[in-house]
Image (cartoon, grey):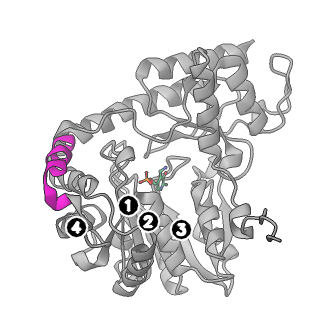
């Protein structure tokens, strides 16, 4: 007699929620594949191709046999050096290359950082609306995500008072992200400093996700929390990557920067999990970080133009309350005024239902607020072509005018 085939998967994996952004994206792509003219604001990635000089570096790297074999799990020395230089340049923090570990994208860096810092039952404070991945990653580490919500009237930025109200003896980590996905909110230097000082005072680690730090507008700078509060460096981990700034989402290169014991712990984990990131992709990342910034500046200017267009377009539709974000490539209107009313014979009560309605009737794909925290909001990515962007807004204006 053979034992029955086990049917259960582990409770930790069973508890993970499917990524709602990927689900909407898949639905939109299925409709588009069926020939429907979908305008998708759902994707969280630049629509530009990777700049040519970066691609050239990768082609050369593929021809070089040195890149055909395993390298150190923590990353190529030249890339760790380039990341240390970038960290000083953009985050105002002096680090040794040994404080850097190269990961398979920013997402891997977030996962690995939380696995390294968070123990069973530890509480992680997560400002909400939050990036879908954060709470799931905390739960996978046995930690407890504690969401702290700030709405449109607060420009989606939490205050120290709110953080303090959420703090308990089990609070070990604050997840800080500025500019934010999904809201595009950028904390001012003063706001950042106040939050950093709060974390320092209470011995709370800060994981600062800086993946959108170069995508800022209106002349603002997203000051790193470790630049605002330098003493925090001993209890902070910086997460970053090439995906958004350099239009390199498919290349999968990110990193963690932090105190030596944390990087050692993460390196031990990575040595069993994934080993080194593709050497070809790492060489491309070196070219990105050390190369000219002009192509990236052109992309940033295009995003800025689209940002202005979409904010103006959405705010002209009654029921949309859209703060003007200063970073990333998302806008996050509060649409609670549209809920509970009849539109084309349907009365959506939640933004999940509203997003479904918009996809069905307008062929416009947006991600509902439920993916990022409370219902009542929609996330629009404006990393799509100017014409498609304008067409989607026209459809929404016509739909809600009817
Ligand atoms: N952090 C945030 C806030 C993000 O929005 C993303 C991408 N959606 C990432 C990290 C990870 O990016 P990647 O894994 O593509 O480097």
Residues drawn in magenta: 54-67
Q: Secondary structure at mark 1?
A: strand
Quadrant including the N terminus: bottom right
Residue designated by label 4: 76
Q: Is residue 362 left or right of residue 308?
A: right
Q: Nearer the viewer, residue 82 or 195?
A: 82
Nearer the camera: disc 2 or disc 3: 2
Note whether residue 215 is visible.
no
Quadrant including the C terminus: top right
Point out residue 216 in the picture as x, y percentages from the top left corner: 37, 46
Nearer the camera: disc 2 or disc 4: 4
Cα distance between the residues tagged 3 and 1? 13 Å
User: Is disc 3's CB within 8 Å of ligand 1?
Assistant: no
Cα distance between the residues tagged 1 and 2? 8 Å
| Numbered circle sitting on residue 175 | 3
Decide which of tag 3 and tag 1 comes sooner along the chain. 3
Q: Nearer the viewer, residue 248 or 382?
A: 248
């Amino acid at each position: 007699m053979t034992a029955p085939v086990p049917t259960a998967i582990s409770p930790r994996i069973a508890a993970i929620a499917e990524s709602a952004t990927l689900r909407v994206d898949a639905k939109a792509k299925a409709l588009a594949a069926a020939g429907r003219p979908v305008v998708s604001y759902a994707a969280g990635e630049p629509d530009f191709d990777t700049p040519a000089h970066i691609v050239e570096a990768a082609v050369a790297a593929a021809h070089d046999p040195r890149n055909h074999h395993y390298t150190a799990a923590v990353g190529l020395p030249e890339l760790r050096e380039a990341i240390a230089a970038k960290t000083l340049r953009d985050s105002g923090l002096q680090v040794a290359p040994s404080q850097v570990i190269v990961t398979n994208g920013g997402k891997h860096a977030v996962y690995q950082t939380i696995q390294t810092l968070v123990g069973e039952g530890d509480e992680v404070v997560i400002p909400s609306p939050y990036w879908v991945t954060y709470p799931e990653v905390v739960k996978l580490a046995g930690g407890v995500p504690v969401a702290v919500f700030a709405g449109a009237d607060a420009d989606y930025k939490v205050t120290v008072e709110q953080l303090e109200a959420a703090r308990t003896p089990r609070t070990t980590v604050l997840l800080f992200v500025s500019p934010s996905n999904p809201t595009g909110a950028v904390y001012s230097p003063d706001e950042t400093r106040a939050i950093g000082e709060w974390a320092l005072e209470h011995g709370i680690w800060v994981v600062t996700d800086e993946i959108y730090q170069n995508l800022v507008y209106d002349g603002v700078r997203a000051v790193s929390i470790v630049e605002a509060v330098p003493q925090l460096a001993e209890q902070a981990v910086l997460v970053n990557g090439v995906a958004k700034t350099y239009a390199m989402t498919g290349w999968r290169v990110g990193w963690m920067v932090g105190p030596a014991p944390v990087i050692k712990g993460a390196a031990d984990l990575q040595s069993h999990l994934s080993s080194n990131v593709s050497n070809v992709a790492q060489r491309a990342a070196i070219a990105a970080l050390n190369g000219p910034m002009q192509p990236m500046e052109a992309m940033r200017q295009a995003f800025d133009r689209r940002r202005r267009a979409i904010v103006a377009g959405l705010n002209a539709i009654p029921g949309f309350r859209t703060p003007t974000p200063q970073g990333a490539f998302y806008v996050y209107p509060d649409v609670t005024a549209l809920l509970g009313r009849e539109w084309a014979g349907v009365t959506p009560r939640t933004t999940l239902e509203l997003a479904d309605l918009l996809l069905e009737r307008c062929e416009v794909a947006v991600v509902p607020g439920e993916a990022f925290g409370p219902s009542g909001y929609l996330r629009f990515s404006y990393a799509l072509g100017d014409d498609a962007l304008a067409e989607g807004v026209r459809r929404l204006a016509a739909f809600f005018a009817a």
